[in-house]
Every structure is written in structure tokens, then in C-alpha cells.
Image (tube, helix red, strand yellow):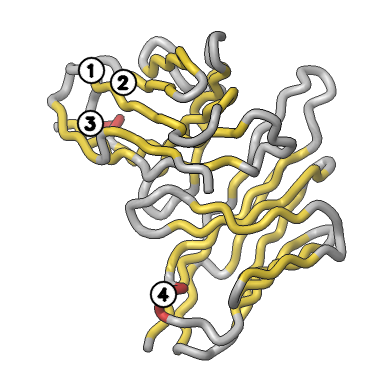
Amino acid sequence: GAVVSQHPSWVICKSGTSVKIECRSLDFQATTMFWYRQFPKQSLMLMATSNEGSKATYEQGVEKDKFLINHASLTLSTLTVTSAHPEDSSFYICSAREEGAVLLGEQYFGPGTRLTVT
Amino acid sequence: EDQVTQSPEALRLQEGESSSLNCSYTVSGLRGLFWYRQDPGKGPEFLFTLYSAGEEKEKERLKATLTKKESFLHITAPKPEDSATYLCAVQPLANMNTGFQKLVFGTGTRLLVSP
């Protein structure tokens, strides 16, 4: 089946620094990738949708200058959390949609990245 | 506003004790409803897609059904390895003005199956 990887799986950084998270589709081409955020015991909140080669579409309330998304190829998207603060600590999950997929829900999720900002 | 509500929030079962999880939804129009399984510290794993009322899908001990207002995930004779959080999401019809769509997730049901 389709596999999505994320790196790193967890990261601890100091307040004010930037962190980059990578999301790769390993065995398929993903024209669309999604970035989600999940707080403990809460559901996934979509942060942004990115299409290969174009600018990401951010959800209302998500600061595009703080959460930089780049989708440079059909298999790689990156999320950079700039000037991270403790309130940015969360579980970040990416997902990828295979080229030709009809429904949004047929996304393949990565294993997530646990970010802790101290 | 499109909304998805899952119940119960948590469910504890004995091994072999069948039960159902509920996903109620309110959307202007439904393109699809999806069930996922999420293990602690992991991303969701896609289970089922349901398109229209009356549809059913099965996979091992799991069976998903759909009506016009809700979906059920039936778990028959569960095993401890079925312990996970089960998420439901809907894809509403596209916004007529923007054409944009996004999934709307419920908060999940945490299932614990004891041996």
C-alpha cells in the first residue's frame, strides 16, 4: 500500500528557533499534500493544503509566515515552524493524496512528528 | 456549518464483546464519509469510504454502515489489538463559490479492548 514517511519523528527545540519537518510519499506521486496539527485527545485540524509547484492554501487562523510550507516535488513537502514558541508544541501530521484520487478522504497519513518547544 | 460528532468519547470492552461506535454528521451535502484507525503516537490509517446511505463495508472484525445522518462502526468479537482511536471524517460537497473542499474530522472514539 501507499506509504508516507515523516522526519523527524520527534524534535525538541528552544524557543525562538526554527524547525523543519519533512513529509515524503515513498511509493507514489502525491500531487496534493496536507498538513495537520493534533493536540492531545483532540482531532486533526487542517493547517494547510499544498499542491506541487504552487503556493500552499492555509486555513483560517494559521499564520503563513510562521508555518512555511514548500511542496517542491511530487514526493516531498516540508513544513518549517519559524521562531517556534511553546504554544507551537504539538503533534504534526502530514498526509498525501495520490494522483488521480477522487475523494479527499483517501489520503495516506504519515506517522507524525512530535514537536516540543522549550 | 459542517460538523462531525463521535460517540462515545471512550469505550472499554472485554475481548469478544461486540459493540458499535457512532459518527453523526451535519453537512450541506455529502461526497463521502471516511473511517480511520489511529494508534497512539501514529498517524491515522485509512479504513473505509462510504458514499451513500445504505452502503456497508467490511474488513475483518469491522463493519461500517451509513445512513443520511450517521455512520456506525460495528466491531464484532474485538481483540486487544483492535484497541486504538477510531476517527470519522466527512467530505462535504465543494463550496459553490470557491470550489474548495476539506475534510471535517470528529474527535474520535478511544477504544480499549481488555483480554
The chain holding disc 1 is A
Task: Give the answer, above or below, for where A55 lies relative to B112.
Answer: above
The chain holding disc 2 is A
Residue at (86% x, 65% y) in the render = B54
> Considering only order in the chain, which callout, 1 or 2, is on the residue closer to the N terminus?
1
On the image, numbered disc 1 is attached to which residue? A18
Question: Residue A65, percent across and down?
Answer: 39, 10
On the image, numbered disc 4 is attached to which residue? B81
Whole-angstrom CA distance, mark 2 to mark 3, is 12 Å
Judging depth in this view, the residue of B23 and B48 nearest the camera is: B48
Whole-angstrom CA distance, mark 1 to mark 4, is 38 Å
Q: Closer to the camera: disc 4 or disc 3?
A: 4
Question: Residue A72, percent across and down?
Answer: 45, 13
Image quarter where the C terminus of chain A lies is: top left
Q: Are marks 2 and 1 in contact (CB under 8 Å)?
A: yes
Residue at (27% x, 35% y) in the render = A89
Decide if residue A91 is in sight here.
Answer: yes
Mark carried by residue A81: 2
